[in-house]
Image (cartoon, rainbow, N blue to C red):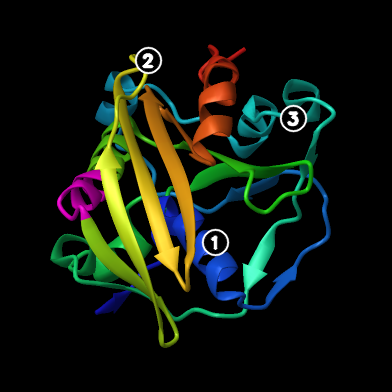
Amino acid sequence: MRKHSTALLSVAAAATLTLTACATSSTPDNGPAIESRPASSPSPAQQNKKATPLTAEQLGPRLLDLVDMGSDYRVKPQKVSKHDDIAVVGCPALENLGGAAAGGSLDFPTQAKVTFSYNGSADSELAEEIYTDAEDKLSSGTRTIFDAMAACPTYQLTSGSTPINVTTQKVTAPERGNEQWATVMTLSSGGRTTMIKQVAVRSGTVLIVVSGSPGLVDNHLGKALDKALAPAG
């Protein structure tokens, strides 16, 4: 059993915390969160062959906003969990990622993210994450996580001593960009069940991940992809 901080499982972790009623602390609602961390410089040969990743300032405007979503939505404050004990049990493919997931897969140097709730409901949320990095890094990092998730149709997440049963099903992803992945996860604990759909699309040096209630993902995925994958100005 190993702890996970994989970005693609962040929504599952959020659902876990909701199911188990774990306390959280929130940062002020200042809109989308944009992060930039130093990245290793590509060699001159790589720069000549591959497109250049975007900057943090270029990612922010690519996120959905309240104008795109409509008046029934609000932006949720970015939350920081007080609990770091969420772990994977019963899925060797995910367990074996261990520190590699935290240090590499989807831990890309530049990212922007935002979460919306529909009518203030915790059961109707949509999260969008946009990453940028070298094309090969985006491709291999994302593929590693989705392949691991697909290898285990059932497993458990634990938060402290509370088990959450998870089932994962691959579903059809939109034929956009260079690569696409999609899953539906069902999390059950204490008589409560939450379904989460996750869609990831990579186009060049940009990766967009849209997660949340399946109906909301289906309703807003098209506009999210159009905005996130628009050619750089």
User: Which stretch is magenta?
Assistant: 144-153
Marks 3/1: CA distance?
21 Å
Q: Please name the residue that numbered disc 2 is placed on.
A: 176
Verify CB contact (< 8 Å) between mark 3 and mark 2: no
Crowd tier of the residue under label 2, counting other residues whose Cα lies within 10 Å: few below 14, some 14–19, many 20 or above = some
Quadrant in which the C terminus is drawn: top right
Residue 131, image x, y percentages: 48, 38
Residue 56, image x, y percentages: 61, 38
Q: Which mark sits nearer the N-terminus, 3 or 2?
A: 3
Q: Does the magenta portion include 146?
A: yes
Query: Is 118 in front, or is 62?
Result: 118
Front label number (1 vs 2): 1
Which of the 4 image quarters holds residue 224? top right
Q: Please name the residue that numbered disc 1 is placed on.
A: 14
Q: Which mark sits nearer the N-terminus, 3 or 1?
A: 1
Amino acid at the residue labelled 3: Asp
Judged left or right of residue 21, residue 31 is right
> Can residue 224 be seen?
no
Q: Please name the residue that numbered disc 3 is placed on.
A: 65
Judged left or right of residue 49, residue 11 is right
